[in-house]
Image: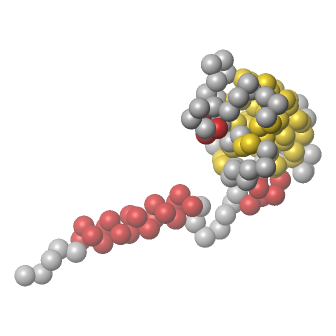
Amino acid sequence: MAKKLGPPIFLGVFTVLAIVFLTGGASDDKDVLRETFQVDAVYYDAGYVEVSFYDKSQKTTNVIMEILGMDESFQKTFSDSEFIEIIPFSNEPKYGWAIHPIVLEIDHEELGHIQLKTEIHPLGDAIPPVIYSTP
């Protein structure tokens, strides 16, 4: 008796399409964003986090930075293509820095509205990946 191959084939095709969709397919339209924007958030043992942002094109008109997961959410607006902000953090979080993501809402003259998300990392540790999105 022959097996029904419909469901396994559908599942395989669906999985491949999902992977292509989630990874951005063969061409990565995020390359322009990676080349244009730099963001880093470093925790120093002295009890603070330094968040730096730089737009190589110098065409950013507005940035809203928010640090999530805090008792009282931190939010600040900048109207320049680069900034460094110092935020007090008394110590490293018990459950790691992933609970305090840094989210930037950027308005850019050419690229439109962009969102960046990254994590804080201790000085000397590898820089976590930045997630880029264009709503």
Q: How many marks?
A: 0
In the image, farthest residue toward the bottom:
1
Q: Position of residue 48 (x, y in %)?
A: 80, 30
> Observer-nearest residue: 53 or 14?
53
Q: Is residue 35 above or below residue 49?
A: below
Task: Report whether 47 appears left or right of 101.
Answer: right
Q: Answer whether residue 74 is visible to the viewer in this image.
A: yes
Q: If the image is split into quadrants, where does the C terminus sit?
A: top right
- Looking at the picture, the colour scheme in use is secondary structure
**Residue sitting at x 31%, y 67%:** 10
In the image, farthest residue toward the top:
72
Q: Position of residue 46 (x, y in %)?
A: 82, 31
Q: Quadrant of residue 5?
A: bottom left
> Observer-nearest residue: 125 or 27?
125
Q: Is residue 126 above or below residue 113?
A: below
Q: Is residue 50 above or below residue 14?
A: above
Q: Position of residue 22 (x, y in %)?
A: 53, 57
> Observer-nearest residue: 48 or 12?
48
Q: Position of residue 40 (x, y in %)?
A: 79, 44
**Residue sitting at x 68%, y 42%:** 119
